Image (cartoon, rainbow, N blue to C red):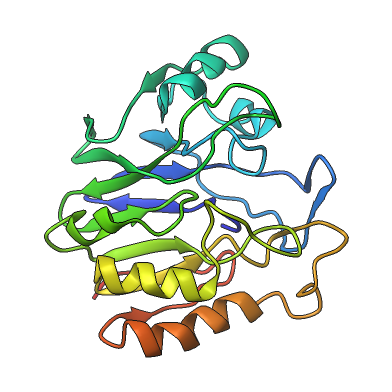
């Protein structure tokens, strides 16, 4: 659905990740169209507190009865600021949601809401059911990726950001390809590209460029992994 917002459906259970459903967040404007979707959700997964992942107005627009899984500091914030039930998770925690298990995973990423404020935590998520789907949130490459799961069907990997560069705690196209080599999923889908952009973004005229670069590097670092580039709004069903 654009940036880090994805809709995952496994065994009839519908999960929405890091919902940003508005045309701008602070000074960051949206390039891709805002998409409508059926808002029947079983849970919302929030990886960390940065504004391009935790957007409070977007969360308030979603049904209040849908629980939100998030790191402890983020869950505390959500309890105060939205009407959702917030379930705090840390790496290794497993929560049953509908027909699937949602497992919180390590994310190497600084998770404060604002500069110099308290780190509220950061996680990724592994959805386990009839298929295994890994949503990385924001993270750097870490050795534990190799043992994250016995078999991942789909890895949703961030490959850029909203600004002119990415720093520590993020994946660029080549780092994401190295992550794909460690994770060894059947399919890797690049996310976190081409949707939100500050005025200084160099790829604005070619929003798909980071995703294509990931595909190029994946062919070098993870040749056994199939790459599927999905534009915002595109749907992929597992064979």
Can residue 68 be seen in the rendering of this structure?
yes
Quarter of the view holding residue 72: top left
User: As displayed, is residue 93 above or below residue 125?
Assistant: above
In this view, the residue farthest toward the right is 199
Residue 174 horizontal/vertical position (percent): 49, 76
Q: Residue at x 37, y 21 (%)?
A: 88
Residue 208 horizontal/vertical position (percent): 64, 78
The answer to which of 147 and 157 lies nearer the viewer is 147
Quarter of the view holding residue 81: top right
The answer to which of 97 and 29 lies nearer the viewer is 29
Asked if residue 172 lies left or right of residue 123, the reply is right
In this view, the residue farthest toward the left is 150
Q: Residue at x 29, y 35 (%)?
A: 91
Quarter of the view holding residue 26: top right
Asked if residue 155 lies left or right of residue 38, the reply is left
User: As displayed, is residue 79 above or below residue 195?
Assistant: above
């Amino acid at each position: 659905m654009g940036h880090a917002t994805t809709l995952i459906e496994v065994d009839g259970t519908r999960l929405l990740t890091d919902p940003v459903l508005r045309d701008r967040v602070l000074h960051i404007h949206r390039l891709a169209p805002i998409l409508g979707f059926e808002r029947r959700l079983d849970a919302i997964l929030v990886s960390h507190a940065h504004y391009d992942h935790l957007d409070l107005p977007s969360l308030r627009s979603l049904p209040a009865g849908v629980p939100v899984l998030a790191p402890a500091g983020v869950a505390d914030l959500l309890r105060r600021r939205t009407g959702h039930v917030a379930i705090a998770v840390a790496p290794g925690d497993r929560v049953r949601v509908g027909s699937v298990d949602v497992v919180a995973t390590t994310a190497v990423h600084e998770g404060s809401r604002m500069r110099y404020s308290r780190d509220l935590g950061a996680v990724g998520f592994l959805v386990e059911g009839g298929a295994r789907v890994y949503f990385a949130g924001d993270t750097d490459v870490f050795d534990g990726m190799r043992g994250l799961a016995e078999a991942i069907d789909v890895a949703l990997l961030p490959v850029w950001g909203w600004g002119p560069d990415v720093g520590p705690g993020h994946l660029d196209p080549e780092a994401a390809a190295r992550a794909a080599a460690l994770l060894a999923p059947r399919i890797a889908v690049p996310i976190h590209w081409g949707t939100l952009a500050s005025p200084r973004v160099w790829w604005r005229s070619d929003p798909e460029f980071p995703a294509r670069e990931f595909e190029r590097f994946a062919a070098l670092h993870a040749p056994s992994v199939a790459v599927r580039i999905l534009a915002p709004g595109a749907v992929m069903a597992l064979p």
